[in-house]
Image: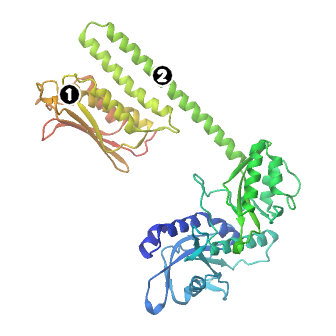
Amino acid sequence: MSTLRELVEEHTSLGPADIDHLHRLAGDWQMISDLSFADLLLWVPVEGDPSAGLSFLCVAQVRPTTAPTAYQDDQVGRISSGAEVAHLGVAREQGRIWREGDPVWYGDTPARHEAIPVRLRGEDGEAGAVIAVVGRDTNLSTARTPSQLELNYLTTADDLAQMIADGTFPSVRHPGETTSAPRVGDGLIRLDGSGKVTYASPNAQSAIRRLGFSAHLVGEDLAALFNRLAEDPLEGSEASNRILGALRGDAPPRKEIEARTATVLSRALPLMPAGVPIGALVLVRDITEVKRRDRALITKDATIREIHHRVKNNLQTVAALLRLQARRVNHPEARAALEESVRRVASIALVHETLAMSADEAVEFDGIVDRVANAAAEVASPESPVRTRREGTFGVLPAEIATPLVMVLNELLLNAVEHGFDSLEGKVADGAEVVVHVNRAKRELHVTVADNGRGLPEDFDPTTNKRLGLQIIRTLTTGELRGTIELRNRAEGGTEALLFVPLAKRDR
């Protein structure tokens, strides 16, 4: 199924600003659907059969959570023309909300049609041309005498529908803000122009009661009430100012209010049908348990990061001890073995250092590889420097892959630097190079470590070679990484190691 942007770009000539406005509308219209007890369908005009008149393409759809849907089937991608969309054409041509007409039938479901023109207000504050039409279709099969809650829902929905037609809804989203909460069913409060509560749903009343206000909300000045209830005076002042901002026509960001160990999330929206401020809509949600779980997760996350930090420190201490020991050893082979161990421990420490700064058990692996490659290049003699570089990106890898993978790459890089250029008699002074090339697919990682050195000996057999570095590579690749490794000579000279690592979720 194509996305809203793909459908609009393929079938219309709407510009980026128009498409962004339609995206904001589709991101915020669940609220209007719930308030309306109706399905909302976003239609854009498209070229169709000239004999059938103007056609419309449905690019987005939302169903209400407060009432049964009028459409069992998904309508996105459907093109309609003729009498079926005549009401959409009227709303588009006349720039007004269309509410006339008799109920229509979809199979056994009677439905009422409405059409709301969508405008984008320009930088000069003037509403532009109609760029789309929202069809509001209500399932009438369960129609009943509306309660006070339903009447307030419908009145508020009509005000917001008029704001869509005026180009004042939705407002520009604040950076980092989502549209997931609060929802209409979490708690709805309607304010008049002076900021007094004219209606509060039962869930809204319960949410405010958690903050310590037990009286009925109707008639209360909500801005002053939030200021009074909040434990933190600054927090209360901010919550109050956001209510007042909505009454002035602004669309302030969401705000959390804490009191009596409870937390309530609030969102204030201005009500300005036809450009006239008549009050505000405030959605509230009791998020006390959500905040409690968030705090527990933050505490656990901080503990995990501290553990990684301490592991990194301990590994660096081990590396320092091994380095001191190497300096005291006179036997060259023993000293070389200790120095190799220092580099292996240091490569693991790099992963834990990165995890200590990460918000989860995953790391940006490119930086780790670059540091390991630079450290490996330092092993080469100053007279014959070896350059290392990376092609492609590893991206973010989970710790269970990153730790053994950095060990394998460390061994491959060290082998290339130490053994690939040790007998070329100066030929490598100008061109010795080791390249780490990575190609990351959705579920697998292909890595090649290639050098332009002397290549593998003719009698080389990686399966029987007893060198510790190769044993580490084979064990970690086939065991921890569940991958494969192949060492071979390159046609253009030098050696390459081909490493394949699956990225699928692993059984624990």
| Residue 100 seen | yes
Pointer 2: what residue?
313
Residue 233: where, in percent of width, then height? 78, 43
Nearer the observer: mark 2 or 1; the answer is 2
| Residue 405 seen | no
Answer left or right for 372 relative to 313. Answer: left
Up the image or down, 185 lies above or below 397; here it is below
Q: Amino acid at mark 2?
A: Asn
Tell me which label, 2 or 1, sits earlier in the chain.
2
Residue lying furthest right in this view? 215
Near-viewer residue (501 or 89): 89
Q: Amino acid at mark 1?
A: Thr
Based on the displayed image, in which of its 4 quarters is residue 64 positioned? bottom right
Pointer 1: what residue?
464
- Say the numbered circle drawn on residue 445: none
Based on the displayed image, in which of its 4 quarters is residue 380 positioned? top left
Q: What is the secondary structure assignment of the residue under circle 2?
A: helix
Residue 338: where, in percent of width, then height? 32, 15
